[in-house]
Amino acid sequence: MHLTIVMPVLEEAARVRTAIAAARAHCDELIVVDGGSRDRTAELASGVGARVETVPRAGRGLQLRTGARLAIEAGADVLLFLHADTRLPPEARLGIERAVDSGAAGGGFLIDFEAAPPLLRCGRVLVDIRTRWLHTPLGDQAHFATTAAYIACGGFSDLPILEDLDFLRRLRRQGPISVVEQRATTSSRRFAERGVVRTVATNWLIWSLFAAGVKPARLAGLYPLVR
């Protein structure tokens, strides 16, 4: 299995080198796609030998779509989409291999939060329920997909937000979505800055409106960027 990690970044100068070093342990190739950073993110990523592509500042969907295209052109069998503030568990690759061998079109991991406040640790239980019952791991849970399934479902759309949920809804038509019973660890900075209750409530509101048919472009204003 040739596994390529696609890492979208935007103004991640403080952590991009560490993120790249951690991700390399799990893949055969790593592609970093910068979404128009105004800091030194792209420069620092190139400085540690990463393959870096730069795209206009138009949302994560374009970054993921661009990175996937480059990975497929280079011969990837499996694509793993990893946020710069998410760390994979030690045996992530083995979990992906087992999922793919069992016939999964793709999937993701359970989640843990870095330096999480007590309320967020309780919220992890709800995320686990959603992930396991609905087989709906979201973007910060390290999506992966076979190249064949990715191509067949049309890949990521150029959306300002909700590119992960939109992608997963189409990916599941190509086969089972696997939940790997290992935990990816992601930053809790969004929750720390905006508050746990407010952030969770906003997320559920956006997901509900999207399910009701509201376009992501109209919902983007409800989800301010936190870096």
Image (tube, rainbow, N blue to C red):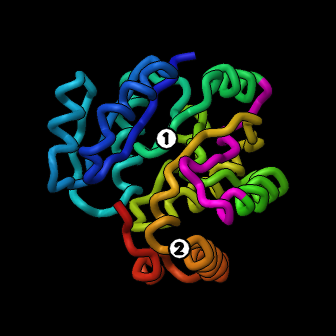
On the rendered structure, is 155 left or right of 10? right
Residue 163 rendering spot, x and y as whole percentages = 49, 60
- Closest to the observer: 138 or 112? 112
On the rendered structure, is 60 left or right of 38? right
Which residue position is annotated with label 1?
81
Count the numbered circles shown.
Answer: 2
For badge 1, the amino acid type reads Phe
For badge 2, the amino acid type reads Gly
Q: Earlier in the sequence, mark 2 or mark 1?
A: 1
Q: Is residue 115 one of those drawn in magenta? A: yes
- Closest to the observer: 62 or 185? 185
**Magenta span covers which residues?**
102-121
Quarter of the figure with residue 1: top right
Q: Is residue 172 above or below residue 196?
A: above
Which residue position is annotated with label 2?
195
Label 2–label 1 contact, CB within 8 A: no
SS assignment at label 1: strand
